[in-house]
Amino acid sequence: MKKIKKRVLALLMGVGLGLGAASSAVAQQSLEDVMKARGLTQKDLLAAAKTYTPTGGRDEYLAFSSGGQSGHVIVYGIPSMRILKYIGVFTPEPWQGYGYDDESKAVLAQGRILGKDITFGDTHHPALSETNGDFDGKYLFINDKANPRVAVIDLHDFETKQIVVNPFFRSEHGGAFVTPNTEYIMEATQYAAPYTEDFVPLEEFNEKYRGGLTYWKFDKKKGRIDLANSITIELPPYSQDLSDAGKGPSMGWGFTNSFCTERYVGGIERGRPPFEAGCSQKDTDFMHVTNWKKAEELVKAGKVKKSKGMYLISIEQAVKEEILFLIPEPKSPHGVDVSPDGKFIIVAGKLDSHAWVYSFDKIQKAIAAKKFEGKDAYGIPIIKMKDALHSQVQVGLGPLHNQYDAKQCVVYTSIYVDSKITKWNYCEGKVLDQINIHYNVGHLVSMEGETVSPDGKYLIALNKLSIDRFNPVGPLHPQNHQLIDISGDKMQLLYDMPIPLGEPHYVTAIKADKLKPAIRYKSGWDSRTDKRSQWRTRAGREKTERSCDTDGKCTVHIYGTVIRSHITPEIIEVTEGDTVSIHLTNLERAQDETHGFAMYSQSVNLSIEPGKTVSTTFVADKAGVYPYYCTEFCSALHLEMQGYLLVKPKGYKAKAGAIQEGQQYTKADYDKQVKTNVDTQAVINSVVGFITSHNYKDFPEVVALVEDATEQLGFADGAKKKSEGYAAKKDYQNSTLWAGQWWQYQVKAADIGLRAKTYLEEHDAKKVAK
Ligand code: CUK
Ligand code: CUA
């Protein structure tokens, strides 16, 4: 205690730590010295200057990366490549309390399949919401390949709000891709399976197994996917792969490619050639061209039947209504990417060395003229490749994905086998530049490269192998994201960034200033439903309610609060067998003042951000003592932010007598504490004087700090009054303890005041006449 007091006071008095001497020693080292010592070249220095972000600096773009097998989303800044957040999506994430509080458990429960909790997801493609084909910064969607699911993340708070399960599919890959006004989110199958839940032998593969493409309807007002107005188009049992939505002239259409149109079923253990041989025999596979606008019209006209809660268009109906066509594409294609102007669709064939550029105009002409080369086994008309193709360009061995530049007709294609990025002109069919990457690049992303107006500037190669790029950390290597400068004619490698969390298939990057995330929640907020929580409470209104049903089963609801640095209540008493529901509301209004809540043996960890209300429910099935505490270091007295859950045995009779404090206090103790408080107040006043004598109102951050400090001083005043009340009654035990609490609030106010003072000094605030 004494030590803390001394330190805080020392800080308040502005006693320096001798940092001045240290910084001048650093300055004596020249740039040349550092270059020599670290073996850096001029080129390295240039790259460093392009990515280094000084303290307090911000990034120009934010990247949303799939977290691969982790089931999360990773958020990082460009060009600094600093990781900012992992967002729990399909997998519990304890730091955020995701999957540990009742509210987020309900979100994960939406993703249950066949009655089972699925606490893993194989995330592949994040997609940002769009308005007029441009990112609007409101929502993020991501798919789960292993379990056919799509999640909705609200970028107001970067939290997962919804998970939908595709009722027809058993796996998927071609999602999430959005239409230009986020009308729909595309999700296509990968591995064909029956639409029914029963057993169907592989002998009936051609007849009963199916692929498909779901257009999930997005309700922008609610910020949720609307299953009842979503549309699935049944597709043949080809392995549908990636998709992309048309825009501009191709608005209203979607493009989905496929592999294994051979409809081969393996069986290596039965002596049959494996899938990989049987699925790559034909020279071409099929791009599926779908007309979602027309599908929507059919739905509106009442022509589409519902199945499993959504609209289902059979292959037969899709053919009859002319909303489904096929076009041959290069063997085992992978990426399919619509150009910013919506006129071209580039497909990269991973077993080919070409990228194939299709013309939407030509496709439309063939459809209008009903010029088809024939039909597939399911009666779907096939447009002749020659009639749809604009050009074919040799880009390297194993092209996978494409991203567009701000420059007209310029596209970048990832070359998996050659470990290269190829920059080329798709209008003229000309290769412009190539760069080596390390190694085996999968997706690549340019800034807002999927939109109608790509920004260019940077490109990130998302590599499948890192091999020798980083310090070895065992047989499982980190992933390697490589930042490339594409602002000039030649691509320039700037930075290697290890990602130690799953295989991030795809990333999408948005201009940072389009995002407007919240600083705090409205008070008593359930962030998962975006409504005021029925379990919220306010300061001074904390309460415990116990109710029992006729079978004698009892439930205890605790409506509690957290604020620097105590949890109310600090003592919870229940009886063995009770169901306990603890609801905590964070009363803080200050930025970044999150509190946590962990408890012994209950697998509970809550993250309670300012304003939020979260709950945890468990059965207190064993009598005993269960300490709980705050898991965020929220103030100097954070370790004291604690409490006890006491689970009493059934029929327990309380012992007589009060809780005995280990320490008894006298008038002298009280006087000493009061003197400390008076001294502290003088220092606070001088800090306040400094702040108010400057133009602090010009700095919103400082205004918020001042509000917070004022609130803490208000609490200090309340504790002071209690302390004085007890002193008047000569109860020096309680008066000393409340004087201590009074000082605790002063320390918090001082801490905040100092932060404000430092901020003003660092930003050269002006002195103003008072
Ligand atoms: S996929 Cu992994 S590199 Cu799922 Cu988009 Cu191509
Ligand atoms: Cu709240 Cu530590």
Image (tube, grey):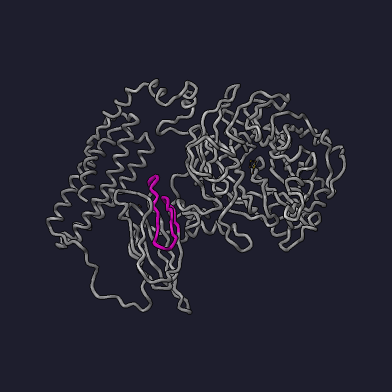
- Whether residue 368 is situated above or below residue 268 in the rendered picture: above
Residue 249 in the image, given as x and y percentages of width and height: 73, 34
Q: Is residue 610 magenta?
A: yes
In the picture provided, is 59 more to the left or to the right than 741?
A: right
- Whether residue 31 is situated above or below residue 186 in the rendered picture: above
Residue 313 in the image, given as x and y percentages of width and height: 77, 53
Q: Is residue 645 magenta?
A: no
Among the 4 quarters of the image, the one containing residue 480: top right
Whether residue 452 is visible: no
**Which span of residues is magenta-colored?**
590-614
Ligand 1 rendered quadrant: top right
Residue 318 in the image, given as x and y percentages of width and height: 80, 49
In the picture provided, is 705 more to the left or to the right than 353?
A: left
Residue at the spot x=40%, y=64% of the render?
A: 558
In the picture provided, is 647 more to the left or to the right than 133?
A: left
Residue at the spot x=69%, y=59% of the render?
A: 309
- Whether residue 720 is situated above or below residue 574 in the rendered picture: above
Which quadrant of the figure contains the C terminus?
top left
